[in-house]
Amino acid sequence: MILEISNYSEVPIYKQLRDQIILGIAKGELAAGEQLPSVRLLADEIGVNTMTISKAYNLLKEEGYLLTDRRLGTKVATFEPAKTAYPQKLADQLALILAESSIQRYSETDILAEVTNILTQFRKDDLK
Amino acid sequence: MILEISNYSEVPIYKQLRDQIILGIAKGELAAGEQLPSVRLLADEIGVNTMTISKAYNLLKEEGYLLTDRRLGTKVATFEPAKTAYPQKLADQLALILAESSIQRYSETDILAEVTNILTQFRKDDLK
Amino acid sequence: MILEISNYSEVPIYKQLRDQIILGIAKGELAAGEQLPSVRLLADEIGVNTMTISKAYNLLKEEGYLLTDRRLGTKVATFEPAKTAYPQKLADQLALILAESSIQRYSETDILAEVTNILTQFRKDDLK
Amino acid sequence: MILEISNYSEVPIYKQLRDQIILGIAKGELAAGEQLPSVRLLADEIGVNTMTISKAYNLLKEEGYLLTDRRLGTKVATFEPAKTAYPQKLADQLALILAESSIQRYSETDILAEVTNILTQFRKDDLK
DNA sequence: GTGGTCTAGACCACA
DNA sequence: GTGGTCTAGACCACG
């Protein structure tokens, strides 16, 4: 998996990393249990400060997407099928994007099509 | 419409305002053409500086959600039904949220239900 | 000649009026010596405050484009062929626009073509 | 490059800064990729508030003339040769200035000479 | 009345 | 170190 960051984006670098890793997991480019490169190695590879990588990894750990294995470093967490209600935080973020879509008068059909389209990129694990 | 601001959130106040105003427009609490409170009045009401309100209004103006009439103040813009493709920026934001949902193994059915549920809060103008 | 103003523009209304009147004169839609509508009449017609019209007229008078005839109201001034050096103020404004064009790497050929093209709209008096 | 600000001009300081930086880029005093002084340093130097500098930089960023690298600060953007049609906004500004020139009866020859003369100050990169 | 601009000084996020 | 955000209060431009 290739991580690409832009030094000119308004989005902080650690946030760009976090987002791309999440997309990578969803797309199956990073499998559950797969090991991530060490902070130092990744920092060298993409040319950013180790503190920045560390911040991204820590954020992802707090969110439950990554785990630290003392012996093996950092790896992707495993998730069971969700049984709880859809998380409020994601619902709020979703509401804001859908509000913008709605104001710009995209139809419900268009929006659902877009959502379905994006979802086809993910959930490769369903095929296993 | 009531705007509520948290001074303790990491989200900048002007961004909180922007988001709430967008939600307000989508929900129909702020009708197209409706006038917004003046920067000074709103600043007093929610206890922040006028420049903070000004920044939020300016951002919304740049995004096309508000218009300023030099004679009358600031009001909600009117939108025509969207004819262009779904904006890349919104699609990217949507992809990230859906990726998180997908990793947490919410099913496509659950996600589409959540989207539909949120959309029912909006588009009240379709019912008129 | 039709004046069109936008209440939503960042440009002050009096400035919009001034600019359109100057373009009107250059295009020959307003002939030298031609009388302009009274402040009150014009204010009614385009739906703005009389003070705004007045401000635009006064600005144009200060700049020498309009004259007030005590008996007949306001009319377009007459200009003799310029003999002085190109005015510094216009040169400065021109320099800024050309700087932007230059940075965006429009070629000298393109820019001169654009200038010539614009000039064909004007100078109808040369044909008289 | 020296920036000079007038506190007595009606032109807002942030606009004066923006204009001078654009001229500086066009003249080659600020090279593509060159780093600009930090907002704090520049604010000290010319004796204005950091927010004023920040506003000027932000405006130039929105217009694409500057870029902010989160690690290194703000620098001049690089431009590819323009391939699109001459921008309407610049054409409108140009038309207004040319209209004034035309009314004051500067000849097409004079105007083109002035334009060419100004352009020789710019585009130094073409000579390299 | 409206929004736009600016100051002086502060604190925070980011890298 | 960098830029981003915010305050409290002021003055100005516009209509």
Image (tube, coloured by chain):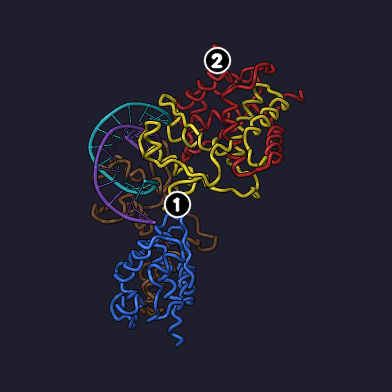
Chain colours: A blue, B brown, C red, D yellow, E purple, F cyan
Query: Can you tell which of label 1 and label 2 is closer to the viewer?
Result: 1
Residue D81: where, in percent of width, then height? Answer: 64, 48
Residue C106 vertical position relative to residue C45 in the rendered view, above or below:
below
How crowded pointer 1 is (Cα within 10 Å; few <14, some 14-19, many 20+) is rated as some
Residue placed most toward the observer, D65 or B40: D65
Task: Name the residue carrying label 1.
Answer: D69
Residue C9 vertical position relative to residue B100 in the rendered view, above or below:
above
Amino acid type at image mark 2: Thr
Residue A96: where, in percent of width, then height? Answer: 37, 61
In the drawing, does residue B111 fall left or right of residue A3?
left
Residue A7 vertical position relative to residue C5 in the rendered view, above or below:
below
Q: Residue furthest top?
A: C70
- Which residue corresponds to the image point at 26% horizontal and 44% vertical from the top-left? B48
Q: Secondary structure at mark 2?
A: strand
Residue placed most toward the observer, D63 or A78: A78
Residue placed most toward the observer, D56 or A70: A70
Residue C110 vertical position relative to residue D8 in the rendered view, above or below:
below
How crowded pointer 2 is (Cα within 10 Å; few <14, some 14-19, many 20+) is rated as some
Residue B11: where, in percent of width, then height? Answer: 31, 55
Amino acid type at image mark 1: Asp
Task: Name the residue carrying label 2.
Answer: C68
